[in-house]
Amino acid sequence: MNFLLLQINDTAFPIGSYTQSFGLETYVLHNIVKNQETAYMYIKSLLHSQLLYVDFLAIKLIYETQDLSKVLYLESLINVATPAQETRQGMQKIGTRFIKAVSSMSLPFNKAFHSYIELCKTPVHATAYGFFCVTHNIHFGEALSYYMYALASNILINCVKLIPLSQYDGQKILYNLHTEFEKVYAKLQILQEEDFCNASVHNDIKSMQHEALHSRLYMS
């Protein structure tokens, strides 16, 4: 078992994911995501759209290229293709904190990842995580699976708090998502670079609307 991978995907890892809802708060306040069923459908939709074509595909492309200049290019595309300012800033904050957290762990010096830290200007979590895993010889399937589960779990925690739902309802949702994880992983295998950032416009709109909500618990 890769305990390093467990640690960097754990909810206790200090990257600040809990401060961001990435548009979920808008869905809840507009009474679109309002119960166990709609929370499940929201996360399922997100897995098959925004997360698949941006985060997960970024990690796949990083593993395929393993070239720092290409990683930085993919990172720039994510920033350019994210129209909602709060979402873009949220991804950058989490990416920056991920770099800070792994840098504080006194890991053996890794020249390639150190070069990434020096050259990246607007890091996002997916690319920082993906290149970290590549340069630390972590198997792609494990890196992607842990990351996918951690993202879904973090989104679910926000659903439980915002709607609100019981912890038991949350665990039912997470269990029912196991099949979706397998479907998304299988679909990812056939996606190519031309599919990158083919994300959900509807979710971008909800993220933009978050800026003007009358009350907010989250930063995005």
Image (cartoon, grey):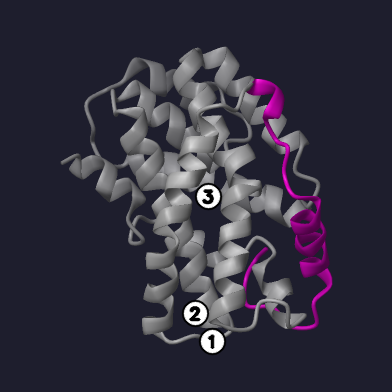
Where does label 2 land, which residue? 160
Percent coordinates x, y for residue 159 in the rendering: 54, 75
Where does label 1 land, which residue? 164
Kind of residue at disc 1: Pro
Separation (CA) of disc 2 from disc 3: 21 Å
Judging depth in this view, the residue of 130 and 122 nearest the camera is: 130
In contact (CB < 8 Å): disc 1 and disc 2: yes
Query: Could you tell whether 146 is left or right of 92 in the image?
Result: left
Query: Could you tell whether 97 is left or right of 133 in the image?
Result: right
- Answer few, some or many: residues within 10 Å of disc 2's Cα (few below 14, many 20 plus, some between 14 and 19): some
Where does label 3 land, which residue? 94
Percent coordinates x, y for residue 66 in the rendering: 46, 15
Quadrant where the N terminus lies? Answer: top left
Task: Look at the numbered disc 1 and give the secondary structure of its residue.
Answer: loop
Residue at 41 percent of width and 38 percent of height:
144
Task: Look at the numbered disc 2 and give the secondary structure of its residue.
Answer: helix
Specify the segment rendered in magenta: 193-220
Percent coordinates x, y for residue 22 in the rendering: 65, 60
Kind of residue at disc 3: Ile
Task: Look at the numbered disc 3 and give the secondary structure of its residue.
Answer: helix
- Answer few, some or many: residues within 10 Å of disc 1's Cα (few below 14, many 20 plus, some between 14 and 19): some
Is residue 95 shown above or below 43?
above
